[in-house]
Amino acid sequence: MNMMDALIAGGWLMIPLLGCSLLATVIIIERLWTLRAKRIAPYGLGQEVCSLVSRGQVNLYWLEGHSPLGGVLAAGLRNSRLGHEQVRARLQEAATAVIHDMERFLSPLGTIAAITPLIGLLGTVVGMIEVFSVIVAGDGASRTADLAGGISRALVTTAAGLTVAIPALMFHRYFQRRVEDITVRMEEQASQVVEFIAHYQGNVSLSDGGESERVEAGGRLAPEVKRS
């Protein structure tokens, strides 16, 4: 039995199963490309930011465009004048937005993994109803094709539903774990920058699109020094 024969044997319930299969494939490919740890939270960025802060060379515009983690760190540094606790709060807000973006499309993928076996089960029930209708009619011997069609629908839709649901569930769990791993990596590097700023004794010099400001360790704006 080829693919077309299976679609025909499964009846109209194969249409939603096929749609779920295509949607799950698109989501899996998109999430595999998007949820790359080196793109979202590259190793060493926190240490690099600490080094730039100590040299007074932090460019917030560059940091925001570097990666989602860079955007989180830039949000904290941009509010470094407000004090240690406010920096943590801004980092948490920015990280929440990044995590929400990482979890995008995971709910639909989980829904597909949950409903496709039910659609297959519905096909099984519909197919068995057809089989028993033929048997009850008392002319099963003369309607062998109808009996075979009902049995085929019962088996094909169940197999199709499980074929879609199993990989969808596997990738859903995999993506959830990857989001957790990336979140832990972001928290580690953000905490590293926060602790560095909290114990940094000099002025935090920030640059954003050509404009710069200096923030003292206590969170106050440092007086600007004009260069001749």
Image (cartoon, rainbow, N blue to C red):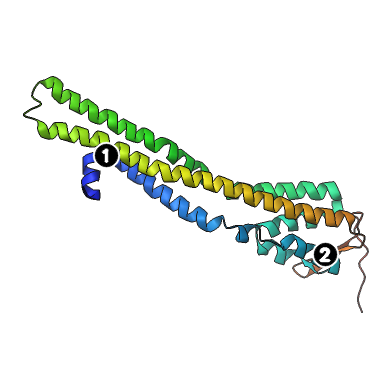
Q: Residue under circle 1?
A: 156
SS at mark 2 in the image: helix
Q: Quadrant of residue 209?
A: bottom right
Position of residue 100 relative to residue 148, above or below, is below
Contact, CB < 8 Å: mark 2 with mark 1? no
Quadrant of the snapshot with the C terminus: bottom right
Q: Nearer the viewer, residue 211 or 35?
A: 35
Q: Is residue 175 visible?
A: yes
Looking at the rendered structure, the number of numbered marks drawn on it comes to 2
Q: Secondary structure at mark 1?
A: helix
Residue at left 75%, top 50%? 91
Say left or right for 15 vs 25.
Answer: left
Residue type indicated by callout 2: Val
- Is label 2 or label 1 in front? 1
Q: Which residue is mark 2?
A: 53
Q: Position of residue 58 (x, y in %)?
A: 79, 66
Across and down, in percent, residue 23 comes to 41, 48
For the point 48% across and 40% down, the residue is: 110
Give above or below for 66 relative to 129. below
Residue nearest the viewer, comparing 110 with 227: 110
**Residue 104 in sight in this render:** no
Residue 110 is left or right of residue 137, and the answer is right
Q: Position of residue 155 (x, y in %)?
A: 26, 36
Q: CA distance from mark 2 to mark 1?
A: 62 Å
Q: Earlier in the sequence, mark 2 or mark 1?
A: 2
